[in-house]
Amino acid sequence: MDALYRDLLVLAFAGVNILSFVTFLLDKVRAKRNRWRIPENSLLLLAAAGPFGALAAMYIFRHKTRHTRFLLVWLFAGLHVLSIIWLGSR
């Protein structure tokens, strides 16, 4: 894999995980203040792209950990790990 391509992929991956973390935090803050919330489908879509940021936020802030649908985030994380292993072996 070309070094520039790999570096861009790593930056994109880090960026989407940071975005996921911040979005889950924002939703938690809004929940505590009884304000407008981020739709669950949007959070799940973002978690599919950045599952590690989502998982970190879920357990650090205790947000969405009791919702069965959000167990999917673990599946997303597993798929990302497999993708990283596959890309690393090329």
Image (tube, rainbow, N blue to C red):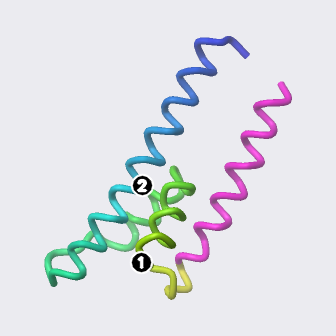
| Label 1 residue SS | loop
Question: Measuring 56% from the left and 85% from the top, which residue is drawn there?
Answer: 68
Q: Which mark is residue 20?
A: 2
| Type of amino acid at the residue the image marks with label 2 | Ser
Q: Is residue 33 magenta?
A: no
State which quadrant residue 85 falls in: top right
Dot 1 corresponds to which residue? 63
The chief SS type of the magenta part is helix
42 vs 81: above or below: below
Please indicate whether residue 78 sits to the left or right of residue 9 in the image.
Answer: right
Question: Residue 22: x, y in percent?
Answer: 34, 55
Please indicate whether residue 71 sits to the left or right of residue 36 in the image.
Answer: right
Please indicate whether residue 53 sits to the left or right of residue 30 in the image.
Answer: right
Q: Report the quarter where the N terminus lies.
A: top right
Question: Residue 72: x, y in percent?
Answer: 60, 71
| Type of amino acid at the residue the image marks with label 1 | His
State which quadrant residue 76 falls in: bottom right
The CA span between labels 1 and 2 is: 13 Å
Question: Measuring 24% from the left and 72% from the top, which residue is drawn there?
Answer: 29
Chain part drawn in magenta: 70-90
40 vs 15: above or below: below
67 vs 15: above or below: below
